[in-house]
């Protein structure tokens, strides 16, 4: 559908970006509420400082932050730009996935999956923990779309998830025994499993593992701390693999055969 005309392409991608920005706003709000033990589905959004309920003009993704110049309209306190960054990221991520998969079930499933990865990454960055509710959400998404894809691909996903999560568990236990410290948390092992479900091929799982290690190393060198959350690196590697993994796999297979 993207290739019908230039106008149609621009229209679809613009709507996709706005949709992604709205989902990004919800995701950041959801993360804040989870961390502050508030209901995700009940209650109005409010200023973190003065607790004043936010109006419609305060809830427009990206534009509200720009129009208010990064300050609350009620108490004039500075507002974190985190929500705006998440809105921009998911907006652009949704556009990239739409370009990659066109208007299809795969595109919308990938958008939902990237949203889950974004939420758990934000929490892992702040708490060094990945709540199980994100793993459950990803598994439900996989099961809900299981029969919307070729049966063999879905089984490949299940196999890939099992292989790489078990492999990472064994490696983690070996490193823990050698170094005497915890190398991977249980949340990271579960994360490898759910990502394997959506990559649907062992080659893509291996590519994702290599990217995760490279991004994790780059992240550790950048922040220069002894302990870093691995979830964001795993999640970003999954997003990159979703976009470029299959074309790269096809190119590699052509070289072999």
Image: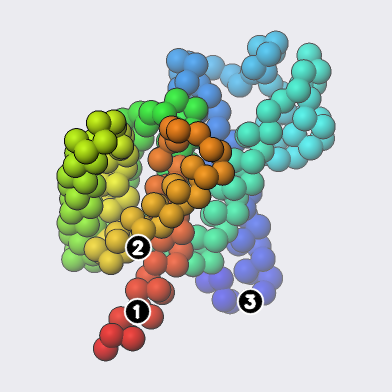
> What's the distance in space between the residues labelled 1 and 3, CA to CA?
32 Å
Label 2 and label 1: CA atoms lie apart by: 12 Å
In what element is the residue under mark 1? helix
Which coloring applies here? Answer: rainbow
Q: Which residue is mark 1?
A: 252
Quadrant of the frame with the C terminus: bottom left
Residue placed most toward the observer, 158 or 204: 204
Q: Is residue 121 above or below residue 14?
A: above
Q: Report the residue at 35% width, 62% height from top.
A: 207
Which residue of the protein is positioned furthest toward the bottom in this rendering? 257
Q: Which residue is mark 3?
A: 5
Q: Position of residue 228 (x, y in %)?
A: 45, 35
User: Can you tell which of label 1 and label 3 is closer to the viewer?
Assistant: 1
Q: CA distance from mark 2 to mark 3?
A: 35 Å
Name the side, left or right, on which 88 lies relative to 108: right
Direction top: furthest residue: 50
Q: Is any atom of residue 143 visible in this view?
A: no
Residue 252 in percent (x, y) is at 35, 79
Q: Nearer the viewer, mark 2 or mark 3?
A: 2
Residue 249 at x, y percent in the picture: 35, 74
Which is nearer the N-term, disc 2 or disc 3? Answer: 3
Q: Residues within 10 Å of mark 1 (few under 14, many from 20)?
A: few
Across and down, in percent, residue 52 comes to 69, 13
Query: Which numbered circle lies on residue 207?
Result: 2
Q: Residue at x 70, y 40 (%)?
A: 62
Residue at (39, 67) in percent of width and height: 245
């Amino acid at each position: 559908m993207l290739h019908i005309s230039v106008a149609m392409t621009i229209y679809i991608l613009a709507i996709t970006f706005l949709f992604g920005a709205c989902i990004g706003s919800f995701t950041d709000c959801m993360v804040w509420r989870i961390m502050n033990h508030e209901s995700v589905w009940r209650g109005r959004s409010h200023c973190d400082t003065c607790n004043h309920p936010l109006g419609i003009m305060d809830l427009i993704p990206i534009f509200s932050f720009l129009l208010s110049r990064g300050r609350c309209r009620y108490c004039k306190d500075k507002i974190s730009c985190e929500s705006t960054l998440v809105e921009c990221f998911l907006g652009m991520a949704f556009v990239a996935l739409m370009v990659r998969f066109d208007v299809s079930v795969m595109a919308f499933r990938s958008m939902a999956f990237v949203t889950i990865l974004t939420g758990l990454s934000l929490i892992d960055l702040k708490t060094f923990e990945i709540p199980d509710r994100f793993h459950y959400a990803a598994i439900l998404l996989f099961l809900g779309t299981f029969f919307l894809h070729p049966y063999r691909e879905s089984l490949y996903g299940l196999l890939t998830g099992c292989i790489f999560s078990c492999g990472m568990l064994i490696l983690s236990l070996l490193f823990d025994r050698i170094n005497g410290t915890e190398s991977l948390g249980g949340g990271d092992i579960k994360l490898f499993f759910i990502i394997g479900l959506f990559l649907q091929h062992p080659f893509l799982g291996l590519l994702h593992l290599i990217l995760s290690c490279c991004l994790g190393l780059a992240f550790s060198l950048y922040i220069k701390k002894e302990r870093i959350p691995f979830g964001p690196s795993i999640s970003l590697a999954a997003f990159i693999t979703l976009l470029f993994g299959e074309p790269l796999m096809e190119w590699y297979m052509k070289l072999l055969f």
